[in-house]
């Protein structure tokens, strides 16, 4: 596996909001999905230097075509989530992204998993081949 | 007040979903706002016979410019909400809508208040004068 | 595989609400997670004849410990979702549940995947062995 | 009105998340409600030095019994919200809180209004008289 590229891991901090909490007094499971989306959106601008707006201006969008999530420990109101994401693999028209959500105070992992993003053409709403300049920006 | 028009009151049933429930085991306050939106959307099609799509096709949209809500009794998981809405007043470029949310099982009122809707021109995003044919459709 | 049990498949209808829609004018991905939760909650009462309240009264709760979701076709405002769930496997302290979300009007599959539920002891918040009477109720 | 007390105004910054955005590409109206809740939760700890946990430990909770909101300018993804809140009036068993949500980049006001909070006894779920020590903490 000597040729396997290791992509950079980036972090985004998110404060748990009261409307994220469910009847069990924990962050509602589906909100972790939203935390990953929020982290990627932030990291597109801040880390990959290609904000979503730039994709849209070029007629591209990103959709999630699949996800796997493991809920290991609950988070609660008052917690700060650190969402770490890392590209696992660049594909022809998408990118697989590993994520971990850890509780800032303890550093303990709460949720992890994988998001499969597909780049689409906004006009046709179909999968689009990722261009070389985008591959370059993401290959960090 | 002999000339005051009384507008029709319409009802929409909504099942409380688990993701509507908050840390107090009640429907989260801001979800009642969403229930009113959902009811109006349903009633536009079903009762006023002018679905949102028709507004959009004509270049119009609706935004909420203000609201007042009174939270009187909480609702819980397992409840069915009946959302009643009634136009209070047609205005030059908007409509004031009274609402009541009652719990189906008991018929008791849980939330009531007023939504102020403004019709906008989707291109300019500015308030638009409501045309006579729309006034007619809403004057039931 | 002659001994493999085939569990019953149940359906729940859910109306897409305006607050489920995201910036792409589709049902937001994480809402499908909530649709599955809502369907299971409904089916616990209606199909398995053991509502969540009964679990809680016995000191038990259910948490999602993992999920896999494939987003195949988007749903939109005006759509009705039919959420079909089916137990794939009963485990010592949990149950794996397959799901499919289809658009009622077309019957086309929009999202499918697997939820791994774990039964917990509400006091200890730890996984609990599923008792025989619960296994019996679920073995339909 | 020379005796009218002017209460302190506090600020909380919130980053708009992708799941806050609605079909109009703006922050969904009901999310502003959640922004105010999140700001008050933060300010209870940080500004009033009496976090929610302390209320709960004493058997008290806070519920919103009414709200008025004026939606003046939309916010969008990429924006940072500054939520300013200020007590308008202390009441026997509640507090009226004015709020303003401004867009950080421009300083322009987007939403303002009033939240009526009621302090409740968590056991009875009924309104509770606010004790003097709490009045003191809030009288800043």
Image (spheres, coloured by chain):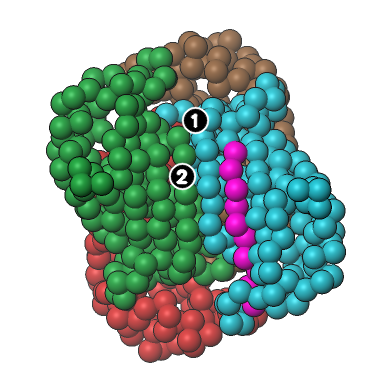
Chain colours: A red, B cyan, C brown, D green
Q: Residue at x 70, y 51 (%)?
A: B88
Q: Residue at x 30, y 72 (%)?
A: D107
| Residue B115 falls within the magenta-colored stretch | yes
The numbered disc on residue D67 is: 2
On screen, residue C44 above or below D100: above
- The residue segment tinted magenta is B112-121
Whether label 1 touches label 2, CB < 8 Å: no
**Viewer-closest of B47 and B24:** B47
Residue A57 can be seen, yes or no: yes
Residue B96 as seen in the image, left or right of residue B134: left
Image quadrant of residue D51? top left
Q: Residues within 10 Å of mark 1 (few under 14, many from 20)?
A: some
Q: Nearer the viewer, mark 1 or mark 2?
A: 2
Q: Residue at x 37, y 36 (%)?
A: D117
Residue under circle 1?
Answer: B26
Q: Answer yes or no: are tags 1 and 2 on the same subunit.
A: no
| Residue A97 falls within the magenta-colored stretch | no
**Viewer-closest of B116 and A1:** B116
Residue A139 can be seen, yes or no: no
Image quadrant of residue D132? top left
Q: Is mark 2 on a helix, strand or loop?
A: strand
Q: Residue at x 68, y 64 (%)?
A: B91
- Quarter of the image where the C terminus of chain A is located: bottom left
Cα separation, mark 1 vs mark 2, equals 17 Å
């Amino acid at each position: 596996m000597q040729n396997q590229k290791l992509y950079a891991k980036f972090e985004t901090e998110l404060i748990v909001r009261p409307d994220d909490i469910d009847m069990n007094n924990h962050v509602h499971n589906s909100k972790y999905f939203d935390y990953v989306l929020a982290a990627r959106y932030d990291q597109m601008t801040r880390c990959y230097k290609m904000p979503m707006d730039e994709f849209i201006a070029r007629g591209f969008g990103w959709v999630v075509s699949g996800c796997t999530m493991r809920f290991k420990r609950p988070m609660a109101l008052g917690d700060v989530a650190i969402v770490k994401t890392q590209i696992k693999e660049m594909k022809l028209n998408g990118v697989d992204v590993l994520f971990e959500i850890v509780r800032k105070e303890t550093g303990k992992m709460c949720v992890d998993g994988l998001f499969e993003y597909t780049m689409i053409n906004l006009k046709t709403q179909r999968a689009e081949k990722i261009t070389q300049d985008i591959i370059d920006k993401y290959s960090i």
